[in-house]
Image (cartoon, helix red, strand yellow):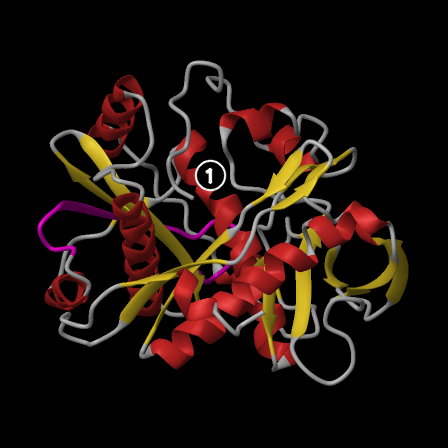
Amino acid sequence: MDKKYVDHMYVSNSKYLDKRVTGIGSIYTVHCGNRELPYTTSAQGKNLHELIRKIYSEFSERIGFGCYSYLRRNTYTINLKKLEFSKCITNEFGIGYSPKVGSIDTTGTAAGTVSKNVIEKAVFELLEKNELYFFWYLNYGKRLERSRIIDLFLKRQGMEKFENYFFEVQTLSLYYTVIYISIKNNHIVTTGISCTPYRYKSIQNAIAEAKIIYMFNLRRGSFYLDLAESEHKEACKFIEQNKFVTHHLKGKLTNTDNILHLKLSYEVKDLKICLNTFFCSGVGPKLVSAISSTLLKCTPFKNDILQSKSNSFLKRHPCPTLQKHVDCVVV
């Protein structure tokens, strides 16, 4: 598969101050029924070798919990609290719809070689998309003031020329979910989101993710996100003028009763890791997907929320103005 991979890569030059390389790779498009699995993967690395490894990792996640999941094979989940293994069918976690969870995309999937790191990465991604719902639809979070170190991060990625906004949400854990949005001429240029145990690491990751999306937009011939003019204006108004409510989770309200001692809200229950035992079997990369019956398993776009009304998370935290609310632009 990698023989001619570099012929299908669009890679940035290395003129940025930290010499990092941003790349978009195309392998092929997978069709399954009336669904199309995303064929593009993207990443940022210190060099081309690291970049290709990261791109292949993302490709593995999409294939492993995308088209392969429709094959209805047996696999296992591990409960991170009880340490119990349970059998399940792969299509319960595949891209699409589940009666219990609602809409499912690749949110909460991760690939890598170190089990602990892979599980943490999957859980953090699951958390960040749920924190994004709190931020976008319930106004939870706070604006972060620009600092010299943030300006340095922006400059290293060539993003300092935009109107840059940073927000922090910390409702479901003691970890830092940072949302980054850049604007120019009343249009959304790009967005990024990251959840890690460290604020500045989350900021750095969010900027890097936004740079990848920005580069993808340029590749398809656009300077902005692919939105209608009215959507750009509504989203910009929301970002620039909305008053957010700081709702940080207190330490005493957290629960560390899980195998990795993650500091999570008591609201996060039944946290499981689904193991992909047929795409990456034996010694080698691990491919997992984090899921909880009390959380969303998708990016909170309005259509996905409307299709997930049975989800217990949305029942506990409904958005009364959802129909009129501007759709989420953070991916």
The answer to which of 223 and 6 lies nearer the viewer is 6
Q: Nearer the viewer, residue 303 or 279?
A: 279
Front position in the image: 144 or 52: 52
Q: SS for tag 1?
A: helix
Q: Position of residue 108 (x, y in %)?
A: 59, 55
**In this image, 307 relative to 327: left or right?**
right
- Residue 14 in picture, x, y percent from top left: 19, 72
- Quick one: quadrant of the N terminus? bottom right
User: Residue 15 appears at what percent x and percent y?
Assistant: 13, 71
- Which residue sits at x=14%, y=60%? 158
Tell me where residue 318 sits by quadrant: top right
Query: Looking at the image, which residue is at 74% across and 49% down?
Result: 93
Residue beneath label 1, please? Answer: 134
Residue 228 in percent (x, y) is at 31, 21
Rendering quarter of residue 151: bottom left
The residue at 47%/68% (across/down) is: 5
Magenta highlight range:
159-176
